[in-house]
Image (cartoon, rainbow, N blue to C red):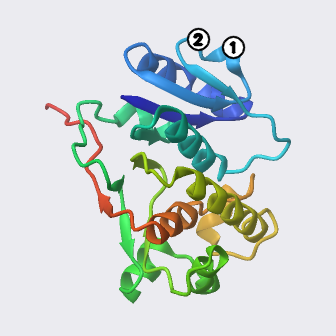
Amino acid sequence: MIYATMCVGKKWVKKHKDQINKFSKTNTLHILTDDNTSFENCICHHYTREVFSYYEKINLILNLSKEYKERIYYIDADWIRDYDTTLRIDDEDTIYSYSVIDLKDKSSYISRVVFEDTEVKDTIMKKIGIDTTINCYMGEAILLVPYNENIDDIISDSKILQKYLEETYHQNSKTHKRLNRYKDGIGYAEGWGITALAIKYNIPIKESRWRKKIII
């Protein structure tokens, strides 16, 4: 199994390197980072951009998928400690997330997603040539993404979405206050991107359990 994560910046590296290294002792873990020396057990991919973009996790997933032609298990650095590595996915076609939010449910959309940017919901599919409204949102902290034979086209469309989302979500964007914690970078709310790609390429989307069972 191929796992992936991203850990960029001194604050995040210091906070999460021990858990990441513990995980990578027994699992194949690719990491996108600007501090290769702190992750001795990982397969490091060097982060070179001057600005931090949350969307780069999507690029990491898709590039690894193209290289290895198998499912990539992406886990945010601060979620690795609780991830259940006994989880196995037999379905070869579906993208799994820890949370899939139905945007047709207005109460769920407002209370759980708290994105006030309905323009993104209504227009993002058009950026990649599909005249429809996005109908769900995948939480992006955990993404279990299968290989797809259209990976080159998916990567091409993803570049279009990256530009759009990085121009939409940045330090000066007017968003719900809950998103303020992400404004140290750009391209946050990257779940819009991977969700749009799944919809265009008819990739099923489902929720998956992910947390370790705790024995009391």
Drawn side of residue 181 relative to residue 18, left or right:
right
Q: Seen from this angle, which residue lies furthest right?
A: 50
Residue at (25% x, 42% y) in the render: 89
Could you tell me if residue 85 is visible in this image? yes
Q: Residue at x 56, y 81 (%)?
A: 130
Tell me the tag on residue 99: none
Q: Quadrant of residue 211?
A: top left
Q: Which percent across, then down, holds residue 199? A: 45, 71
Q: Are marks 2 and 1 in contact (CB under 8 Å)?
A: yes
Residue type highlighted by circle 1: Thr
Residue depicted at 80% across the width and 35% down the height = 48
Residue nearer the viewer, 198 or 169:
198
Three-letter code, disc 2: Glu
Q: Tell me the CA gap for discs 2 and 1.
A: 6 Å
Name the spot of residue 2 as percent of width and height, x first: 42, 30
Q: In which quadrant of the rendered image does the N terminus lie?
A: top left
Quarter where residue 102 is shown: bottom left
Q: Position of residue 132 (x, y in %)?
A: 51, 86
Quarter of the picture containing the C terminus is: top left
Residue designated by label 2: 40
Residue 192 vs 2, above or below: the answer is: below
Pointer 1 local density, CA inside 10 Å: few below 14, some 14–19, many at least 20: few
Residue 27 x/y as whole percent: 39, 20
Can you identify the residue that label 1 sits on?
37
Viewed as shown, does residue 43 lie left or right of 147?
Answer: right
Question: In this rendering, would 17 be left or right of 34?
Answer: left
Q: Residues within 10 Å of mark 2 (few under 14, many from 20)?
A: few
Q: Is there any visible trace of residue 188 in the rendered image?
A: no
Q: Is residue 137 positioned above or below 93 on the image?
A: below
Q: Nearer the viewer, residue 35 or 177?
A: 35
